[in-house]
Image: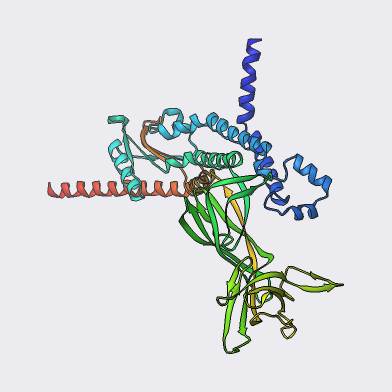
Amino acid sequence: MASQHRSIPRRIWKTLSSVATGITLLILTVIASAAGTFILQRPLTDPEQMLKAYSPATLRWLDAGQLTDVFHSWWFVSLLALLCLNIVFASLERFPTVWRYFSRPYRRPDAHFLTGLPLHVEIPVRSTRSGVEAAERAFRRLGMKPQHVGSGEEFSLYAERHRFARLAAYVVHLSLLLILGGGIVDAIWGYRGYMALTLDDKSNAIDLRDGTKKTLPFTVRCDGAGQENYADGSPRRWWSRLAVLEDGREVKRKEIEVNEPLVYRGLRFFQSGYGSTGQVGSIRLLAVSKKDPANSHELVLHPGENVSLDGDTEVRLAAFVPDLVINGNQIESRSDQPNNPAIQLAIRSKAAGDTRLWLFANFQAFAHSNSSPYDFKYKDLAMGYFTGLQVSYEPGQWAVWAGCILMGIGLMMAFYFVHIRYWAVPVNDGRGRLVLWVGAAASKNREQFEERFRRLVREIEQELKANTAAERRVKAAALVGA
């Protein structure tokens, strides 16, 4: 019974550390991420658009499964956590062997290694010293720094390159853990919301996905916004000039666009929309004195404001209809666009009392008389607008970006660097001859590596031939001198 209990944790370990489990979890994560991409997500999608895209029954089913908020759902977080455990367990399972390669390189091969290494040659040499010296010069000529191993008759050479490439897989594993961990942090502690501001409006609250509001520790003010269009009238660019206020003081200002957010205290404010409020923002008029037509005033009216023309007369905007249409005896608007604007002014004069006047932008000759001291002419108007801001707080993004950078490093280590090792060992070939055993091993790309190995062998043989020729010249010179 005890052995059975001990086997259960072992089975769990084997399951979570297996490559098959990792591949399965990775496929499920990709499928879930694709679902979060193709299924409309809240609050990025307008509620009316959601209702148009899905039937009420389908939408209830999607909401119940948190498929309209995939990246913050409990099951997606659980999937990421399981994938993190699989990466950790798989790394721990295989890391000791790789670490032995890295921390204790095999510098002095034994007899079994000498006979079992596939890539090796035996080069006859006259002496241990001459063979090792020739190999060392060949190594250095090819840009390697050989290490001397042992002494005396056990003297040999060892050289290697890019030992760090053995750790490439674990660098990639660490990068995945950072990316997945950042995603988990964002899913649990991060949030996204929406904020809509009109000109000179300010707010410190955002609408969250679940319909609640979240209060921010600072205030955002809109100092301007606009839309630039292509020649065909389609939107080309939305922009907003935002200011951040904290403790009543302006601490930051930036003009944002769709991919250029305002970032402050970990929150990002993205430009996500722009549109008309359906209300007038300002109206420009010309007020001409009835007594002296040369005496005129250009004035700008804003909703809710009174504008003084002189000490006795003031005017305000009483009503505004953006797209006038007469329906029976009723004045209505066909749309929120200023296609046929109608403006009603309320004029207060000490001499003439109160009066109201309608102005029609498209029919300026058609205007009622008024008892005030002024006649009014329409000049221009600007509609009120709102700018839509997508607000996100993603505290795990630093980990995600660090993971992406680290993954690039890990992939570069894996694809562009190969751990290669060379040995040059003087041995007896078993037939009474002294030979220089030269072997090599590469962690990958063995076919390409064979050509480099053959080049090293040729260099060593050339060095040995050069040594033999030099020795012969020395002997010949000695004989001549004798």
**Which of these two is toward me, 198 or 363?**
363
Q: Give the residue drawn at x 48%, y 35%.
A: 117
Picture coordinates of residue 472, whole percent (x, y): 24, 47
Residue 410 coordinates in the image, percent (x, y): 50, 45
In front: 304, or 99?
304
The image quadrant where one finds the N terminus is top right
In the rendered view, would you say 52 is above or below 159? Answer: below
Identify the image quadrant of residue 258: bottom right
- In this view, the residue in front, 450 or 258, is 258
Chosen colour scheme = rainbow
| Residue occupying image coordinates x 58% and y 80% | 298
The residue at the far right in this view is 328
Location of residue 353 (image quadrant): bottom right
Q: Can residue 433 be seen here? A: no
| Residue 245 in view (yes/no) | yes
Residue 282, horizontal then vertical, whole percent: 62, 71
In the image: residue 183, left or right of residue 265: right
Answer above or below: position of 50 versus 189. Answer: below
**Which residue ends up furthest to the top in the rendered image?**
1
The tally of labels here is 0
When the figure is inspected, residue 104 is found, relative to residue 315, above or below; the finding is: above
